[in-house]
């Protein structure tokens, strides 16, 4: 099944309060773009402990709704601007939106693993809404977590 963000969900994502989305649920919520199935989102966020109960919670809060058509149309979501700005889209390459959606949960996972010393960096990552913003934080993330842990994020952002 494919889910989309509702207007309420988009607003909650922008405002960051008024909902009971935890930071890890927030990471999963961003991935619901009308293209990925719930199974793909759960698979991508499994290292953070996201389960179907988390998805059901988002549905119950009115933050997500089922997509009317699995493959059609432009997905409604806060990343719509990034989709239209994805000037680097060429045959065989990922769009900036796809890169952001893959990299964001990894970045959250890495900063969450830093504990209190990574708190501000975690907030900075959570504040990103586009590929460009997350790519600007990449050097700080590399420095904070080290080359080995950063490698996965680097591939998601730049490969």
Image (cartoon, rainbow, N blue to C red):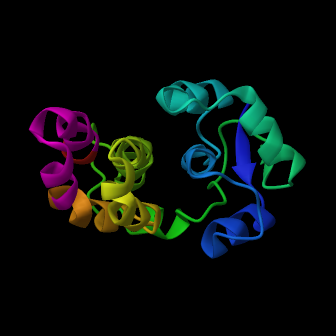
In the rendered view, would you say 151 is above or below 99?
above
Q: Nearer the viewer, residue 70 or 63?
A: 63
Instruction: Identify the image quadrant of residue 137.
Output: bottom left
Query: Residue at image x 75%, y 56%?
Result: 20
Q: Is residue 81 at least partly visible in the picture?
A: yes
In the rendered view, would you say 39 is above or below 32?
above
Is residue 148 a member of the stretch shown in magenta?
yes
Secondary structure mostly taken by the magenta-highlighted segment of the chain: helix
Instruction: Identify the image quadrant of residue 122.
Output: bottom left
Where residue 51 appears, as percent x and y from the top left, is: 67, 28
Query: Residue at image x 36%, y 66%?
Result: 120
Query: Residue at image x 13%, y 42%?
Result: 146
- What is the span of residues highlighted in magenta in the rendered image? 140-156
Query: Farthest residue in the front direction?
Result: 116
**How many numbered discs sit on the rendered protein?**
0
Where residue 50 appears, as percent x and y from the top left, is: 61, 32
Q: Is residue 68 at least partly visible in the picture?
A: no
Quarter of the image containing the N terminus? top right
Residue 120 placement, left or right of 5: left
Residue 57 placement, left or right of 115: right
Q: Nearer the viewer, residue 75 or 16?
A: 16
Q: Nearer the viewer, residue 150 or 37?
A: 150
Residue 142 placement, left or right of 19: left
Where residue 147 appears, as percent x and y from the top left, is: 10, 39
Where residue 88 appears, as percent x and y from the top left, is: 26, 58
Query: Farthest residue in the bottom direction?
Result: 15
Is residue 155 a member of the stretch shown in magenta?
yes
Quarter of the image containing the C terminus? top left
Query: Residue at image x 36%, y 41%?
Result: 113
């Amino acid at each position: 099944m494919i889910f989309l963000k509702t207007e309420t969900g988009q607003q909650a994502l922008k405002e960051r309060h008024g909902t009971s989305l935890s930071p890890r649920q927030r990471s999963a919520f961003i991935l619901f773009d009308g293209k990925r199935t719930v199974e793909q989102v759960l698979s991508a966020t499994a290292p953070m402990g996201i389960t179907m109960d988390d998805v059901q919670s988002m549905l119950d809060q009115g933050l997500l709704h089922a997509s009317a058509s699995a493959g059609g149309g432009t997905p409604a979501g806060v990343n719509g601007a990034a989709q239209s700005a994805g000037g680097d889209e060429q045959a065989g390459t990922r769009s900036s939106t796809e890169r952001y959606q893959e990299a964001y949960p990894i970045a959250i996972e890495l900063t969450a693993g830093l504990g209190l010393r990574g708190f501000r960096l975690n907030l900075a990552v959570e504040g990103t809404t586009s590929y460009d913003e997350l790519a600007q934080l990449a050097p700080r993330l590399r420095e904070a977590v080290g080359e080995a842990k950063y490698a996965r994020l680097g591939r998601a952002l730049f490969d």
